[in-house]
Image (spheres, coloured by chain):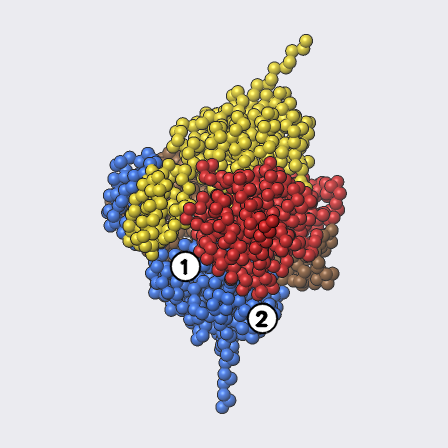
Chain colours: A brown, B blue, C red, D yellow
Amino acid sequence: MLVVMSTDATRDQVARVVQVIEEMGYQARPMPGAQRTSVGVVGNDGRVDGSRLEALGGVAEVIHVSKPYKQVSREWRPENTLVTIAPGVVFGGGEIPIIAGPCSVESEQQIVLAAQQVRDAGGAALRGGAYKPRSSPYAFQGLGEAGLKILAEVREATGLPVVTEVVDPGDVDLVASYADMLQVGTRNMQNFPLLQAVGGVGKPVMLKRGMNATIEEWLMAAEYIAQRGNLDIVLCERGIRTFEKATRNTLDISAVPIAQRLSHLPVIVDPSHSGGRRDLVLPLSRAAIAVGADGIIVDVHPYPESALCDGPQALVESDLRELAAVAAHLSPLVGRTLTPAPAVPREPAVA
Amino acid sequence: MLVVMSTDATRDQVARVVQVIEEMGYQARPMPGAQRTSVGVVGNDGRVDGSRLEALGGVAEVIHVSKPYKQVSREWRPENTLVTIAPGVVFGGGEIPIIAGPCSVESEQQIVLAAQQVRDAGGAALRGGAYKPRSSPYAFQGLGEAGLKILAEVREATGLPVVTEVVDPGDVDLVASYADMLQVGTRNMQNFPLLQAVGGVGKPVMLKRGMNATIEEWLMAAEYIAQRGNLDIVLCERGIRTFEKATRNTLDISAVPIAQRLSHLPVIVDPSHSGGRRDLVLPLSRAAIAVGADGIIVDVHPYPESALCDGPQALVESDLRELAAVAAHLSPLVGRTLTPAPAVPREPAVA
Amino acid sequence: MLVVMSTDATRDQVARVVQVIEEMGYQARPMPGAQRTSVGVVGNDGRVDGSRLEALGGVAEVIHVSKPYKQVSREWRPENTLVTIAPGVVFGGGEIPIIAGPCSVESEQQIVLAAQQVRDAGGAALRGGAYKPRSSPYAFQGLGEAGLKILAEVREATGLPVVTEVVDPGDVDLVASYADMLQVGTRNMQNFPLLQAVGGVGKPVMLKRGMNATIEEWLMAAEYIAQRGNLDIVLCERGIRTFEKATRNTLDISAVPIAQRLSHLPVIVDPSHSGGRRDLVLPLSRAAIAVGADGIIVDVHPYPESALCDGPQALVESDLRELAAVAAHLSPLVGRTLTPAPAVPREPAVA
Amino acid sequence: MLVVMSTDATRDQVARVVQVIEEMGYQARPMPGAQRTSVGVVGNDGRVDGSRLEALGGVAEVIHVSKPYKQVSREWRPENTLVTIAPGVVFGGGEIPIIAGPCSVESEQQIVLAAQQVRDAGGAALRGGAYKPRSSPYAFQGLGEAGLKILAEVREATGLPVVTEVVDPGDVDLVASYADMLQVGTRNMQNFPLLQAVGGVGKPVMLKRGMNATIEEWLMAAEYIAQRGNLDIVLCERGIRTFEKATRNTLDISAVPIAQRLSHLPVIVDPSHSGGRRDLVLPLSRAAIAVGADGIIVDVHPYPESALCDGPQALVESDLRELAAVAAHLSPLVGRTLTPAPAVPREPAVA
C-alpha cells in the first residue's frame, strides 16, 4: 500500500501518517519526491482496509498494491483447482464441459425434452432455473421447489448433473438438497448473505460475474464463499454493461485469461446471456474455447418460440449439436478435450 | 410495442407475428415500410413480456413503447407521493429533510455523539448501518442487532428518526421493528426477495439506485416493492459506475428530474457515496438541492480518522453545519424550505 | 512514480529496474514488501513516459503519482486564470457569463433573431456553428465561411462576442479571423493537430470534454493547447457516455469542482448537449451554477421545430429568459453575479 | 421511423406530426394505443434526420428503425467486399492476413529488424507509425515524413506492404504517397474532415473503432469514407472503454460477427491495444480468429524494453512466431487459411 500525500502536506501530517501505519501494525517507509511525499506500507498482507489512512490530513490518495483477496488467488495456491460436480464432470482440468438447458424450468415435459437434447448433443450437465430473478414483478418468477423436483427426476433419467440458481439465503439448504451445483447470478454477485450461505452448504458453486463488477470485485465475491470453507467455485463470465447496445451485454473475453492468471479457480463463459442473441452463441462459444475457457454454459430450449424467458437467445437442438461438434474440434488446439455426455443410465433390472 | 421484422422476412413470418400477438390478447397493426415491415402491438398495458415475440422467425427487434412499470409511474398517479417517516419528516412535499450519520454503527458513544451533531446542525433524521455489505469478507461487517438497539436508544434521546440498511430478507422483520425507514442499498437494488420482503413489512423504504442500473430498472425495482402494497418509497440517486475514476462513482444529477417526471415518488441524493470524497459533498449537495432533489443523505462521523468504514467521505460537525446553512439558503430558490431538526425531547418528569 | 514488481520477480529484475530508472536520470528507491517489492521513482517531474519501465521483466504495474500535465495544473499556477473573450465578458472571475445561440448557423435571419433573443434575455455571448461535425455524412454540415460572415455581422449589430467551432486544423486561421472564441468539440478533444493549431492562433479556446475522456485526459488535451503558448482556455463539461440511455449523455457534475481543484482554468457547463432534452436544461443549469461552474452554454433556437440540428434540446426565448432570471438569483449564493448582456451598440452617427 | 407521442398529446399535436412527416416527403401511419399514440413513418430510406420531428409538441421519442448508413450495409451489398492492399494480401476472403510491426517508427535499424522478424514469422503486412497521436504533448510524436521514407525503403527490401496512420487531413496526400493502407486511429474515428480526405485519396483505409463508439457510429464513420467513393475499408475492433481497469480497453469480441452481419466490409482485430498487455495478445488472437475475424494486427518490437511507445504490449519475435503458428492451425476450423508472407524480393542482378 502506498499513501500519496498532497503537494502541500506538512511535515507533521507525514509524521501522523507514519504513526498511524505503525499503530496498525505495519512498517512505514516515507519516500520524499520532487512534487510530493509518498509513504509505503510494508508488511501488509493484502487484507487491510486503507480507509483509515485516506481520512488523515494531507493524504491525497491511497494506492493498493497487494491484492485484497487471498484464498482464491493463484499466489496462494499455484495449481489449478479442479471442481467436480458429478463423476466425470470436472472443471479446471483437461476436459471442457458444456452445460446446457433452458433459462427456466417451465414443465416436466419441457425439461425432459431439453435434457434429452442436451445429452444427445454431447452436453455434460443440465441447467434450468426454478427461482428466477426477473426485472419485472409481473414476469414469470419460476416454479420454485416444484421445479427443483422436476430437475432431480430428470437427472435420474438422464444422468446429467443439475446446475440451478439460488436467489435467497433462506432457500440455500433446500436448493442444495436437489442440485449438483448452485448458481449465484449476476445480480447477486455482491449479495453477501447469499455468498456466505452457499459458502457453508457444501456444494459446488458457479459464481456469475456481476454485470457491473470488476474482475477484482468478482474475485472478492469468490473470497466470500471461500472464507466459509468452500473452494469448489467456478467463475462464469457472462458479459458486462457498457455503452454498446447492439448486444445485451459486452462479453469481456479478456476476463477469462486474466481471472485464470489471478486465481486458481476455473473460468467458464456464458455466450447466451452476454450476447442476448441466438446468432452470436456459436461464434462467441468458439472464441471462448479458443481463449482458453474451462467450460461453456448455453441456453437451449426445445421450442424457443414459446419460452417464458430469454427465448431470443436460446439455441435449438441442431444449434447445440453444431456447437458441440465445433467445440470438440477446437478443444485440442488449446490442449483440451470436450467432456463427454454421461452414459445412458442403466435401466433398473426387472424383478 | 413495435415488432420490427428483418428486411428479408417472409410474408408468412409477418403473418405468424400477427397471429401470436392476437393469441396474446392484443391487436396487431402491420406497417410495411420501404426497407422492412414493422408490426405495432395495440392494447398493450405495459406489463407484457415481449420475449416470446423476439424469438419468432424473421423478427429483428422488439421495441418497447409503453413503460414496463405501472404503480410507481406518474401516469398512474399524477400527484407527488408524500413519504412520512416520523412526525414532521416528510419527503416529496415542500420541505427538504437532511438525513445524516455515520456509515456504520460502531459504538454507543460514537452514535450518541454523531446524533447530537446531526440534530444540532439541523438534520432531520439519523442514518447508521448495523448490517454492512462490504466487498471484502475481512472488513467490518456491522454490529447487527446490537447496533439496531443503539440506534433505537439514540432515537429516544434525540427525537431523530432512524434510517438503517437491511441486506437479508430474513432480517427484514427484525430491522423493521427498530427502524423508521429501511434502506435497500445499491448492491441490493435487484435483490428481488429482499424487495418483496421490504414491500410487505409496512415501513417506508429508501431504495438506492444500483450503481449499474438504468433509471428504468430502478423504477422497476420500486415496482417490486409497490406490488407488495407499499408505496412509501423514497428513491435515492447515489452515483453510477462509469469509466471516470476521479470519483468513486459518477453522480447522475440528471436522474433526479427524470425520475421525478417518470414517477410520483420522491427522489433524494447521496453526495457522499457518489463522490467518495469529503471535499465534493458540499458542492454536490448544492447541486442536488438546486436541481430539485427532495432530500439529501450524507455521511457524518464524529472522528472520521478512526471510522471503520468510508472515513474519507465523512463530513465533520463543522462541515455539516455549513451544509445545512447552505441548504437553508438554497431551498427557497426552488420553492422549498429545509425540514427543521426535531425539538429536543421532553425530559422525563422526576417522580 | 511507483514500479510494482510481480511476486515472483527475481533480485536481478529488481536491479535492472533500478538501473533503468537511474539511466533515465531519476533516483530509485526499492521498497521490499511482504508480498512483493516496489521501486519508487524520485525526482520525476510528472512528464516522464513510464512505458519503458512497464516493459521490463518482472514488472507488474507502473503507478503514476505525479500528474502528467503541468502548465494547466493548479500546482503550477495557484490563482484562477481569467479568460476574457470581449470587453466585460470574463470567465473564471466573479461573474458568470451565459453563452447562448443555435447549434448551427442556418441563415442570416435565424441568427439575427436568435442574437436579439440572447441579448434581450441577458446572454453575454453568442454561439453558432458554421462547421458542424455530424455523425451522418447525409446530415447538414454547416454553411462554412458564409456562416462565419453572418456571425461577424451579427456581432457588429448586437455587441455579442461570437463563439464558434473549428473542426479542421486547416481552417483554424480562417475561423479565428472571425470568432472571439474558438470551440473544440467533444469529438475533437484528442485531435492533436487541431489542438496544436488552436494553441498557436492567439484566440481564446473553449475545450469541450470528450464524451469518453477522463478528467485527466481532458486536462492533458488542454496542456496541448497550453504548450503552444495559449493559456486562454475555458474547459466545458458536456456529459460523458455511460450505460444510461434516458439522457443523451450523463452530465458529470462532479467534474466541475474536480477540474477547478486540479486546474486554474475556468470550467463551464453545457446542459443542452449533456441532457439532449429541453426539459432538463433549466434544472441542470441550476445545478451547474450551484456546484460552482464559471459559465453556462445553452442551445437556443428562434423556431426549434424547424432547426436543422439538435432541435429537441434547444430552448425558446421564454425558456432563456427564465434561465437567465434563475441564474441571476442563484449566483449570489455561490458568491457570483451574472455577466450582463452587452450594451446596445451605439448607432453610427449620421453624417 | 416511429414517432411516439406522450400520453397527454392532443389530437392536434398528432395531426401536426402527420403533417410534418408528409411535408418531409414520407407517409404517416398513426397508430393509436392503449397508453399513447405512435405515428409510423413509411418510405424513409434510412438517411432522414429525425430531429425536426423530435422538436414537435407532444412528441415523447423518435425511434429509428431503418439503418442510418447505406453504402456500407450488407443490405446494400450482400456479398463480402474484398480489400486488396498488395498482390496476395486481401482482407475479407478466404485468407487471413496478419499485420505486425512496432507502434512507431523510431529508426531505420529498428524497422528493418522488425520487418525481417515479421516476414520470417509469417506476417503479411508491416505496420508502423510515423505520425503518432499521443495523449501527452511531451511524449514522442513520431518521425513524420522521415518515418514514411524508412517504411517505403523497408517495403522495397522485404516485399511487405505498409500500413501507417494519418492524423491530419492536410497530411493525407503525403502519407498516401508512401503507404499501401492508411490507418485512421481510434481517437480520429469521428474526425470527419480526415474521413473525407482519406475517402478521396484512392488508397485502402483501416478504420479503427472509436474507443467510445457504438457499432452503428463506427459504420457511420465508414459511410463517410464510402460517400467519397472509397469502399476499400477494413474495420478494426480495438477495444472499447468500460469500467473494467484490468485491461487498457475491453475487447468487444462480439463486434466482429455483428459488424460482419451488418456490413459487407472486412473486420479485423487488434489484440495489442485492446488488452494493453503482452500476455493477452496470444489468447485474444486465438479468440479473434475463432470468432471469425478477417485479420489480426499486432504490435511487435525488436527490443520492447526500449520502445518509445506501447512497449508493454509489444510481442517479441518468438511470440510472433507462436502467434502465426497458432493462427495457421486455427484458421481451417473457420474455413480459412493464413495469408503467407510475401516471397523474398528478387535480389537486384549485379551488373
Residue A222 appears left or right of D173: left
- SS under mark 1: helix
Quick one: C286 or A8, which is closer to the camera? C286
Q: Which residue is drawn at 52% across and 37% down?
A: D192
Residue A74 can be seen, yes or no:
no
Evaluate whether label 1 is on the same chain as label 2.
yes
Q: Residue at x 62, y 51 (%)?
A: C86
Question: In the rendered image of this protein, does residue B267 appear above or below residue D318?
Answer: below
Labelled disc at residue B261 = 1
Q: Residue D188: x, y in percent?
A: 55, 38
Residue C232 appears left or right of A132: right
Using the rendered view, name the quadrant where residue D124 is placed. top right
Question: In the rendered image of this protein, does residue A118 appear above or below residue B73?
Answer: above
Amino acid type of the residue that numbered disc 1 sits on in the rendered structure = Arg
**Residue under circle 2?**
B321
- Local packing at callout 2 (Cα closer than 10 Å; few below 14, some 14-19, many 20+) is some
Q: Residue C224: x, y in percent?
A: 65, 43
Q: Residue D322: x, y in percent?
A: 56, 30
Instruction: Using the numbered discs, state the Cα–Cα distance from disc 1 to disc 2 in whole angstroms.
Output: 31 Å
Quick one: A349 or C280, which is closer to the camera? C280
Question: In the rendered image of this protein, does residue D98 appear above or below residue B115?
Answer: above
Amino acid type of the residue that numbered disc 2 sits on in the rendered structure = Arg
